Amino acid sequence: MRKLLSTLTLLLPPALLFIALAAWMHREQAQALDSARAAARLNNLSPPRPIAEVASAVAAMKLVTVEIDTTIKVERGDESWRGDVIAAIEAPVRLSFGTDLSKMSVSSLAFSPVTGEYIIRVPRPTIIATQVFPERGVPKVDVGWLRLRSNAGEYYLSQARKDLPAVAQRLQLRPDDALRIESTTREQVEKLVRSIVGDSSHVAVSFLDTEP
């Protein structure tokens, strides 16, 4: 996957790269899910599948992705005896997070005969792509009494627009957004595992960096 991402990065501009990456991730995930469903052929009365077999099937799914939309605000300006200049733009951002399942091992999966529950531990989702929409940004310019908006104001506004991508890369998620990403990731992994072991099976998902 890293080789494919490197090739795309060299050949495509940022906007097209994000679209191509998103399409590829969704296609990979859909194909893996279809393959898992086809391979399952289980009914609700079937005994538990061997852990090694389930772990191998989960690893074949490669990647679980979650997208979240948020906004960022960038301010640029200058202080002067002629009056201060503050230019700001607030723009929407789409972040894609991924959980790599390709290295799933038997040690990351267990089955409890007491509760009849599959217990799986996966990597915590990390950011894999960022897309900024500056054309949908909302600009705001405040200039001092001896400053001209057409000169100083527009200059600093253009600087704020230019810095949007860099600020987006350093974006810190709000706690509720981070919780939503983790919750959605768990739900997706649960769905994928059930497609392998049976839709009525109980599945518990946690992250590798948390206590069992």
Image (cartoon, rainbow, N blue to C red):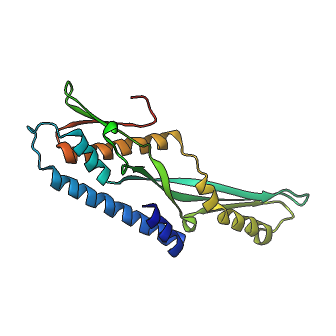
Residue lying furthest bottom: 11
The N terminus lies in quadrant: bottom left
Q: Nearer the viewer, residue 59 or 161?
A: 59
Q: Quadrant of residue 19?
A: bottom left
Residue at the image position 70 percent from the left and 68 percent from the top:
158
Q: Is residue 194 above or below residue 11?
A: above
- Whether residue 120 is visible here, answered yes or no, is no
- Whether residue 73 is visible here, answered yes or no, is yes
The C terminus lies in quadrant: top left
Q: In this image, 109 relative to 35: left or right?
A: right
Q: In this image, 27 relative to 126: left or right?
A: left
Q: Position of residue 8 (x, y in %)?
A: 48, 70
Q: Is residue 204 above or below residue 130?
A: above
Q: In this image, 113 relative to 9: left or right?
A: left
Q: In this image, 97 relative to 52: left or right?
A: right
Residue at the image position 11 percent from the left and 46 percent from the top:
42
> How many tags in the picture?
0
Q: Position of residue 27 (x, y in %)?
A: 32, 63
Residue at the image position 85 percent from the left and 56 percent from the top:
79
Residue at the image position 42 percent from the left and 69 percent from the top:
20
Residue lying furthest top: 114
Q: Nearer the viewer, residue 144 or 210?
A: 210
Q: Nearer the viewer, residue 95 or 91?
A: 95
Q: Is residue 181 above or below residue 79?
A: above
